[in-house]
């Protein structure tokens, strides 16, 4: 069981759930703290299944490389039969696609199914072809943006232009993480780390457009605190992520880079919660940030990268 939990990257699954849940809440706006509707639950299920499928198939396609660079992983070490992993990955992909279709039926909208189909294709494209190419970080970032859109479309959105800033910004942020982690198996190249840091910073700035874009028109669209206070909070979070990345830039050893990557991935949950704070207020933000417990407990069992 531990090998399978390592294969699906147990702690990282919490970030997938946080994205789709936050996407649904951002579009829904302030709502009573009640159990989310069926469309939301199915969107979260689709996110979890598709993310897990992507992780499993990633290792299936990387088996020969991992025999050299990461022999301790479940497939090259022999803890899991690669044929069983391939079967599990494809089954998870089918479950995710079916759950996205279910979310479309529950939401009475075709968009969750369409987003789920594109996300499925993007995951396969990254794992099978794009990962080792220059397009790899962009495809990975696209997967994260689509995951946000899966939750947003389940709520009938995006319904306003400034809401698009979130999936676009988070896509750029995750593309930056992927670029930063490009050489994490050994000693990373400085130019790759700098490019990854800049992309992460750009993505965080774009995602904050959910609040600062309305401010340009003199409208403050935050649920329970001043927009300037929210932007200050976002800035502190962004600075903490980038500071950890800067430490890895100063010492680009595999240990430091992996720690910075793990921190940037974990921060996705906090960032999602703060975006929900702007849209829905404190109660739903707390509900989202509680997913950090899943990540923190999970990473004591298996590594997130």
Image (cartoon, rainbow, N blue to C red):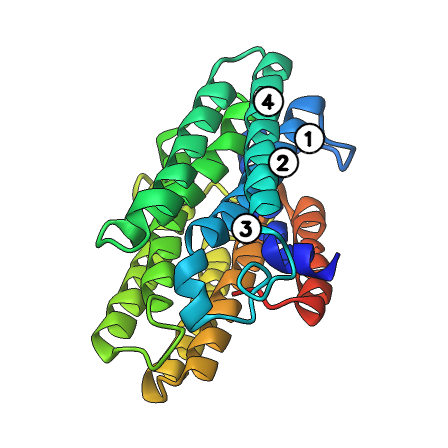
Q: Earlier in the sequence, mark 1 or mark 3?
A: 1
Which residue carries the number 4 mark? 98
Is label 3 or label 4 in front? 4
For image coordinates 70% across by 71% down, the residue present is 300
Give the number of the disc on residue 179: none
Identify the residue at the far bottom of this view.
251
Residue placed under numbered mark 2 in the picture: 44
Q: Secondary structure at mark 4?
A: helix
Label 1 to label 3: alpha-carbon separation = 17 Å
Q: Residues within 10 Å of mark 3 (few under 14, many from 20)?
A: many
Q: Is residue 281 above or below residue 3?
A: above
Q: Position of residue 92 (x, y in %)?
A: 60, 36
**Residue 128 placement (x, y as % from top left):** 36, 44
SS at mark 2? helix
Which x, y percent locates residue 14? Answer: 63, 52
Mark whose residue sits in front, 4 or 1: 4
| Circle 1 SS class | helix
Task: List the residue tagged with mark 3.
Answer: 272
Specify which label sits upstream in the sequence, 3 or 4: 4
Mark 4 touches mark 2? (CB < 8 Å): no
Disc 3 and disc 4: Cα gap in Å? 25 Å
| Left or right: residue 255 compared with residue 284 | left
Callout count? 4
Disc 3 vs disc 2: which is toward the camera?
A: 2
Residue at 50%, 63% (x, y): give it: 233
Side of 297 relative to 151 (left or right)? right
Q: Earlier in the sequence, mark 4 or mark 2?
A: 2
Q: Quadrant of the N terminus?
A: bottom right
Kindly check if marks 4 and 1 are in contact, taking CB atoms under 8 A apart as contact: no
- Is 298 located above or below residue 27 in the figure? below
Question: Where does label 1 land, which residue?
Answer: 41
Spatial CA distance of label 4 from label 2 is 12 Å
């Amino acid at each position: 069981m531990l090998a399978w939990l390592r294969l699906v990257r147990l702690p990282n699954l919490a970030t997938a759930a946080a994205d789709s849940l936050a996407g649904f809440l951002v579009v829904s706006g302030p709502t009573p703290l009640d159990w989310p509707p069926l469309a939301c639950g199915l969107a979260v299920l689709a996110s979890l299944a598709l993310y897990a499928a992507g992780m499993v198939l990633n290792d299936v396609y990387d088996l020969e490389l991992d025999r050299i660079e990461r022999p301790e992983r479940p497939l090259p070490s022999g803890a899991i039969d690669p044929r069983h992993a391939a079967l599990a990955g494809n089954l998870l992909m089918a479950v995710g696609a079916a759950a996205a279709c279910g979310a479309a039926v529950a939401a009475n909208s075709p968009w969750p199914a369409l987003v789920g189909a594109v996300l499925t294709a993007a995951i396969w494209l990254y794992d099978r072809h794009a990962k080792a190419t220059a397009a790899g970080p962009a495809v990975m970032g696209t997967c994260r943006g689509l995951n946000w859109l899966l939750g947003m479309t389940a709520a009938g959105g995006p319904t306003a232009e400034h809401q698009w800033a979130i999936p676009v910004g988070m896509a750029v942020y995750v593309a930056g993480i992927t670029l930063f982690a490009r050489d994490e198996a050994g000693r990373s190249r400085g130019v790759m780390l700098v490019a990854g840091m800049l992309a992460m910073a750009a993505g965080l700035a774009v995602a904050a457009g959910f609040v600062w874009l309305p401010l340009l028109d003199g409208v403050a669209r935050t649920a329970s605190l001043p927009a300037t206070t929210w932007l200050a909070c976002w800035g502190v979070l962004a600075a903490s992520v980038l500071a950890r990345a800067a430490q890895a830039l100063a010492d680009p050893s595999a240990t430091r880079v992996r720690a910075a990557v793990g921190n940037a991935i974990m921060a996705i949950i906090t960032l999602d919660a703060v975006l929900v704070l702007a849209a829905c207020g404190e109660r739903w933000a707390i509900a989202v940030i509680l997913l950090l417990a899943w990540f923190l407990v999970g990473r004591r069992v298996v590594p997130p990268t």
